[in-house]
Image: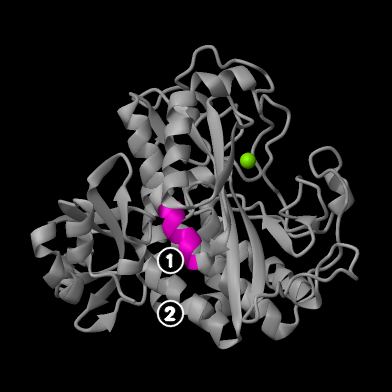
Amino acid sequence: MTTDLSAFAKDNGVKFFMVSYTDLFGSQRAKLVPAQAIADMQEDGAGFAAFASWLDSSPADPDMLAVPDPATVVQLPWKPEVAWVASTCMMEGEIVAQAPRNVLAAQVAKAKERGLTVKTGVEAEFFLLLPDGSDISDPADTAEKPCYDQQAVMRRYDVIAEICGYMLDLGWGPYQNDHEDANGQFEMNWHYADAMTTADRHSFFKFMVKSVAEKHGLRATFMPKPLAHLTGNGCHTHISVWREDGTNAFADDGDEMGLSAEGYHFLGGIMKHAQGMTAITNPTVNSYKRLNGAMTRSGATWSPNTVTWSGNNRTHMVRVPDAGRFELRLPDGAANPYLLQAAIIAAGLDGLDAKADPGKRRDNDMYAEPEKARGAPVLPLNMLDALRAFEKDKSLKAALGDEMSTAFLKLKYAEWKDFKAHLSEWEKANTLDI
Ligand SMILES: [Mg+2]
């Protein structure tokens, strides 16, 4: 049954709806619509000038209408008189094909045609920084190996407990919170779900973490590498695929890793498209300071360097921690929540269709003995490499749709050009007296 947003407002004391969409750079955009006006908006959508966000639109284009998806409505736990709702971007009665949530909806539909539901869980790591973003916010958080630091996590208890409490209220099934491997870094885990639900929650989580941090006088960041000497923000994604009868299509008790043939083929698709999909999973200039990054203070980057997979070994791109699922350790905190899921499904379904072979399992420690995986494809070393790899990956581009692929590449190449024009301190230090 479709939720009537007007009735929802009356029942829950909602004064405003935040009608929200996510653009190609992962920015969340919204209009605050008073509850008195939501009935018409639910029907027709809220009007936006698409050119004003990153969607590769023209200023001459007609209004883009963000039509609320009432199934996603949630009251902001920290401001219950406001309700957030994700929306479907439309223009002149047509779906805006490159809008990230629409891109993911198309992939979810393709999986459904095969009788499959892709379920995922994300580990969206973040830092709590000073408001100006210059450093971590807790001067006592100085341990060389701060992961799971009991004292440090308690110094941020007020922030973590507030967010976790909200996730409990929202019914996400949060189950653990910890201090992560970098000073000032945290991770909060909630239960996995179908890819669209996870993407909506992931978007809302980022909004919620930033909002609650601000309330406490802090600044939360999901930036892949906000501090050069510390471990970066990953967004490890756990993946399994389920059949209509509710069974896990990846599970096979008879296999030594507990993975079925479908599991290996889906994994094979991820391996095949990894270099191209890195443009989406690791979409910023800064992402490549985490991937193939320099060693961190804690002794490990926890980030992959090559297109390799392993068992319960965190030094490879894919880890199979348990039967019936695997963990993609490639994505970082800058990944667009919708495009991340869309790229995984597109690559995985291609693997299923092609009965792709993931290649051999590697069991070496990639940080201590990388030579043991010599010959394995290397992940892109910078954003330009990643964009070129995506541009070359015709089947991944086609699977994600020409509109999305063309728009994404156009905007990201322009961003690279902008970055290239930036003169850094490093260049001056190393080139001024040449
Ligand atoms: Mg982690």
Q: Say whether marks 1 and 2 touch (CB < 8 Å).
A: no
Q: Quadrant of the N terminus?
A: bottom left
Which residue is painted at 17% across and 58% down in the image?
Answer: 10
User: 166 or 325: nearer the eye?
Assistant: 166
Taking the image as four quarters, which one is ligand 1 found in?
top right
Amino acid carrying label 2: it is: Asp
Q: Which one is in front, 413 or 235?
A: 235
Q: Main secondary structure of the magenta part?
A: helix
**Label 1, label 2: how far apart the Cα atoms are:** 10 Å
Q: Where is 258 relative to 383, above or below?
A: below
Q: Tell whether position 201 is magenta.
A: yes
Residue 331 spot, x, y in % from top left = 58, 53
- Where residue 200 appears, as percent x and y from the top left, is 42, 59
Q: Nearer the viewer, mark 1 or mark 2?
A: 2
Residue 402's tag is 2
Give x and y (percent) for residue 57. Answer: 25, 69
- How many residues crowd around disc 1 within 10 Å: few (fewer than 14), some, or many (20 or more)? some
User: What residue would you read off at disc 1?
Assistant: 409
- What kind of element bears circle 1? helix
